[in-house]
Image (cartoon, rainbow, N blue to C red):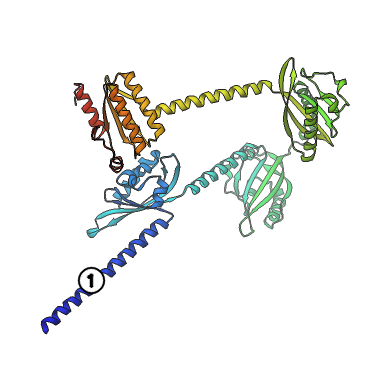
Amino acid sequence: MNENLTREQLIEKHQSMKAQLEQLEKALQESENKYQATTKALQVGIFYTDAQGHCTFTNDKWLEIAGLSAEDALGEGWTRAIHPTDQQLVYEEWYRAIEERRPFKLEYRFQRPDGQVTWVLGQTIAVQGDGQAVTGYVGAITDITKQKLGEEALLRERNFTATILNTITTLVIILDNKGKVINFNHACEETTGFTAEELRGKPLFNYLVLPEERPGVEAIFAQLQAGMFPNQYENYWLTKDGGRQLIDWTNTAILDKDGAVEFVVGTGLNITEKIKLQQQAEQNVQVMAAREATYRALINAVPDLMFQLDAHGIFLDFKGSSELLVPPELFLGKHVNEVLPPHIAQLTLDNIAKVLATKEMSIYEYQLPLADELQDYEVRMVVSGEAIVLAIVRNVTARKQAEIEREQLQQEVIEAQKQAIAELSTPIIPIVEGIMVMPLVGSVDSMRAKDLMRALLSGIRQYRAKIVILDITGVPIVDTGVVSYLDKTIQGARLKGARVIVTGISDAVAEALVDLGIDWSGVETLRDLQTGLKVALNSLGIKLVN
């Protein structure tokens, strides 16, 4: 009885341990599932490496940013994702972090195989085992491209603003809410003789304002501080050499997020010599008159025809050229229907109505025979007054002909590019006399397989090849149709008297051949291109010397 109880107890203990083990396995599986779900859901790329830096795991986000497959990223393959320009920087910082026993953190770029560049923030920490020995590294990369582009845009905008401020002739000064100089453009430097660095951070009133005018300037500044802006004021500025310049200021303020004045911005014009300004005003009138005359001269020099028409299509005025086919008295004051062919007259009336309705320029074209040749004309029509339009007519026959010739040339270039692409997709490489290599890279479809056959047979004839090495290391997969064409290609080469060696059959291609039931036992195959070359050279009695 005691022996039976002991056996039952053992069985019960065994069953209990088995149940506990099953619960542990279930908990472990749930933990693994949660971990896998977490790494997929994260918006950062996660990767693990061993102690030597060889990649052992990457999550989907890392692969998406890098543009690599999980297999390609393993080992040292992950380094191919780093932008070539940044690789040295990343290596140096990586080894420096290991040497200093600190986490790795760096901003750098990834470049996908398709050329897309992504800015990332890479961070890595060491994983330590027993005895504090480093067993590997866990890291994360965060896509910061938008942030980087924003920083670059902000820097461009800042440089652009600084360039404008230092280019314009208007005086621009920026003060803080205490009256200290923050910025001081080039025009201010030229006016006062002070540089921006000499005055930056210093009170404006102590350096540039006359003592007797200081109360008035401080009162204007107080108004700006109180939110009374914009305002205008005239006062003298003291120059570095002791001179005075009268400035006409327009002032405003920039508020902080709480609505308080943070900066005061003043833009000014130097009005020291008012007489010169008055003379300049008179000169401006003369300049405007001269410009008006120049404008009229330019209008008369333009070879285009110009017509003014009213809303009903009556010719009001014109500016002629050698293109004018009839004297003015035959069309001025007349309706377009009386002067132009019916279809062009209707086209003109439609565009007059359109331009007057939309107030936007309208562009249209028509053809007319001139000197026994058909001429192309372009018309640009705009509003030029109340219910009046201006039509500028230009002969564009030469331009049209040039466009046709350009399209023809472009088509020729496209055809040449197609030919070049076709040649690149079926490369023939003569190695030595009698040996030729055709390396294939990428997917091979039926169309490309036909081109391969034609190129191979042509290459055998051109280079008098006795041995042809068909290297398919770069072919990821094949189907029945492609294998059939390859068989025909091999048979064709043999009929041409050439020996064919196939190299670089990948595991995936080999499995596909077996799954498709294709027998290549009669085809000479070798492990890789290097082995194929050695066999081919030995066959011709050529020995390689180290």
Which amino acid, by three-letter code, is at mark 1? Lys
Residue at point 24%, 30% (across, down): 532
Q: Quadrant of residue 361?
A: top right
Q: Position of residue 208 (x, y in %)?
A: 65, 45
* Left or right relative to 437: residue 317: right
- Quadrant the C terminus occupies: top left
In the displayed structure, would residue 295 be above or below residue 56?
Answer: above
Label 1 sits on a secondary structure element that is: helix
Q: Position of residue 529 (x, y in %)?
A: 26, 31
Q: Quadrant of residue 522?
A: top left
Residue with the mark numbered 1: 18
Please state which of residues 202 and 284 is positioned toward the viewer in this rendering: 284
Residue 146 seen anywhere in this rendered image of the structure = yes
Q: Quadrant of residue 125?
A: bottom left
In the displayed structure, would residue 51 be above or below residue 543?
Answer: below
* Left or right relative to 435: residue 308: right
Q: Position of residue 234 (x, y in %)?
A: 74, 45
